[in-house]
Image (cartoon, rainbow, N blue to C red):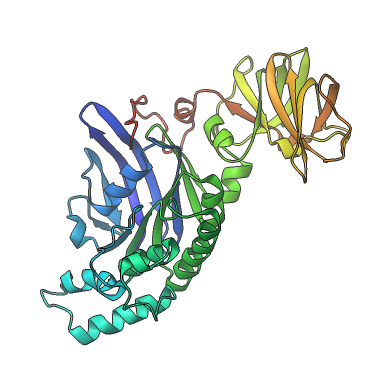
C-alpha cells in the first residue's frame, strides 16, 4: 500500500489549462474518487498519477518517493481503461497474463508457472476462474470489465487506477460491478483512484471524494462531509439536489443571519471553517429539498414563504417547485401533501440544515487560511475535453 501525495500540480495543453493547483493526499489503502462533469480535468489528473502525462509544474509522490519524472511502466500502477482495451484475438487467460509476460523484476522474467499461478488467482478474485479459455467476444460487458480488472490486478500494483470503468455497462451491471470493485478493493486493501461523473456512484463507492470543476479540486473529503458540508455552491449543486436562495448577510453571531427576497430573513451556518464572512456580503443560502418541512419542528426553525409553480408526484415523495421572489426553489415533501400550482406555501427549515455559502467558488476558497487554495494564483481556462 502507498500514500499518494500531489503537490501543486498543473498540466496544460498549449494555452489551455487542464488541471491546476492540485494539492491532495490520497491515503494508503483507501478508494479515492475524482468526481466532476465532463471537461473538469479528472481524467487528466488520473493520467498524471499514472505517468501518461508529465505535469508542467508540481510534484507527485508515492509515499515519500518522488515519481514525477518516473515513466509509467516503472510506477507499478495497474490501469483499468474506460473502453477496457482488451485484445480481441487473445483468450481471457492471455489477456490477463499479458502484463506479467512484459514485467521484469530486477531484470528477470516471470516463469510460466508463476504467471499461471498469478493469472489463476486474479481470475478467481474477479470470479472468472472457469472462463480463462474463452475469447473476449464470447463474454458479456460485465465479464469483459472483470477481465480488465484482473489484468490490472495480476501485476500486484501499488496503486489501482480506474477510469470510468462502469460507464459502458447497463444500470443493473453497474450496480453489480460496483459491489465487486468494493469487495476486491477491500480484500486487497490497495490504494485506488477512481474516476467518474456519476455522483451516486462516487458517494456509494468511495472513502473520499475529490469534486472537480474547471481543472480545480473544489473539495476533497469523505462522502458524508461532501454532501452535508459542501464548501462551494458548485459542490452543493453537483452533489445531490439543492435549493439556493440569494441573499445578503445582515448579522454574524452564533450563526449567520441573511436577508432574502420579499423582506424575509433566514439563519444558517457556514460549512467553511475560517471563511471571513462580512456583513453586507452577497451569499447563497443553501438547503437540501428534503430538509424543508410543511410543519415547524422547533420554535426557531426558519420560515420561508413562496408561491408554488409546479408539483410532480414521484411515488415516495412530492417534488414541489416554488418561487421566493424571483428565485426558483424546490422542496421534497410527503407524497400525500395537498399542494397544487398557484398555492402560497410556508416551509420550515432547521437552522442547522441551512448552509450559508460564499459566491465565487475557487476564488472564495482562496480567502481561507490553511485551505489548499489559500492565496493561490487566479483561475485559468480549463480544457473542455479533459
**Residue that extends furthest to the bottom in the rendered view of this protein:** 113
Q: Residue at x 63, y 14 (%)?
A: 280
On screen, residue 245 above or below 33: above
Q: Residue at x 40, y 31 (%)?
A: 214
Residue 340: image x %, image y %? 84, 26
| Residue 366 falls left or right of residue 297 | left
**Quadrant of the image for the N terminus?**
bottom left
Q: Is residue 81 visible?
A: yes
On screen, residue 14 above or below 5: above
Quarter-wise, where is residue 324 in the image? top right
Q: Nearer the viewer, residue 135 or 119?
A: 135
Quarter-wise, where is residue 289 in the image? top right
| Residue 142 falls left or right of residue 297 | left
Q: Residue at x 28, y 62 (%)?
A: 86
Residue 26: image x %, image y %? 41, 54
Q: Is residue 1 visible?
A: no
Quarter-wise, where is residue 347 in the image? top right
Residue 328: image x %, image y %? 68, 21
**Residue that extends furthest to the left in the rendered view of this protein:** 107
| Residue 58 falls left or right of residue 359 | left
Amino acid at each position: 500500500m502507498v500514500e499518494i501525495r500531489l503537490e501543486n500540480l498543473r498540466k496544460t495543453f498549449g494555452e489551455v489549462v487542464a488541471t491546476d493547483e492540485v494539492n491532495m493526499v490520497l491515503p494508503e489503502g483507501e478508494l479515492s474518487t475524482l468526481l466532476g462533469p465532463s471537461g473538469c480535468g479528472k481524467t487528466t489528473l488520473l493520467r498524471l498519477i499514472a505517468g501518461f502525462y508529465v505535469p508542467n509544474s508540481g510534484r507527485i509522490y508515492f509515499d515519500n518517493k518522488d515519481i514525477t519524472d518516473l515513466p509509467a511502466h516503472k510506477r507499478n500502477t495497474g490501469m483499468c481503461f474506460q473502453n477496457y482495451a482488451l485484445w480481441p484475438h487473445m483468450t481471457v487467460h492471455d489477456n490477463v497474463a499479458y502484463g506479467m509476460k512484459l514485467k521484469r523484476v530486477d531484470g528477470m522474467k516471470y516463469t510460466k508457472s508463476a504467471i499461471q499461478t498469478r493469472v489463476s488467482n486474479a481470475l478467481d478474485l474477479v470470479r472468472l476462474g472457469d472462463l480463462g479459455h474463452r475469447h473476449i467476444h464470447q463474454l458479456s460487458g460485465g465479464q469483459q470489465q472483470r477481465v480488465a480488472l484482473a489484468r490490472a490486478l495480476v501485476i500486484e500494483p501499488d496503486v489501482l487506477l480506474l477510469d470510468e470503468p462502469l460507464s459502458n455497462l447497463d444500470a443493473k451491471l453497474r450496480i453489480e460491478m460496483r459491489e465487486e470493485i468494493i469487495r476486491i478493493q477491500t480484500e486487497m486493501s490497495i490504494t485506488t483512484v477512481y474516476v467518474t461523473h456519476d455522483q451516486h456512484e462516487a458517494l456509494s463507492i468511495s472513502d473520499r471524494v475529490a469534486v472537480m470543476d474547471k481543472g480545480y479540486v473544489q473539495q476533497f473529503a469523505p462522502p458524508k462531509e461532501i454532501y452535508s458540508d459542501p464548501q462551494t455552491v458548485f459542490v452543493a449543486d453537483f452533489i445531490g439536489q439543492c435549493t439556493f436562495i440569494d441573499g445578503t448577510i445582515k448579522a454574524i453571531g452564533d450563526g449567520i443571519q441573511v436577508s432574502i427576497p420579499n423582506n424575509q430573513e433566514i439563519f444558517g451556518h457556514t460549512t467553511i471553517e475560517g471563511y471571513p464572512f462580512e456583513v453586507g456580503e452577497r451569499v447563497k443560502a443553501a438547503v437540501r429539498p428534503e430538509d424543508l418541512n410543511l410543519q415547524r419542528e422547533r420554535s426557531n426553525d426558519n420560515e420561508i414563504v413562496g408561491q408554488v409553480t409546479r408539483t410532480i408526484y414521484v411515488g415516495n415523495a412530492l417534488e414541489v417547485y416554488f418561487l421566493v421572489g424571483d428565485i426558483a426553489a424546490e422542496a421534497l415533501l410527503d407524497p400525500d401533501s395537498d399542494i397544487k400550482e398557484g398555492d402560497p406555501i410556508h416551509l420550515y427549515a432547521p437552522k442547522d440544515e441551512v448552509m450559508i455559502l460564499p459566491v465565487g467558488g475557487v476564488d472564495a476558497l482562496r480567502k481561507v487560511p490553511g485551505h489548499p487554495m489559500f492565496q493561490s494564483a487566479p483561475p485559468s481556462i480549463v480544457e473542455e475535453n479533459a
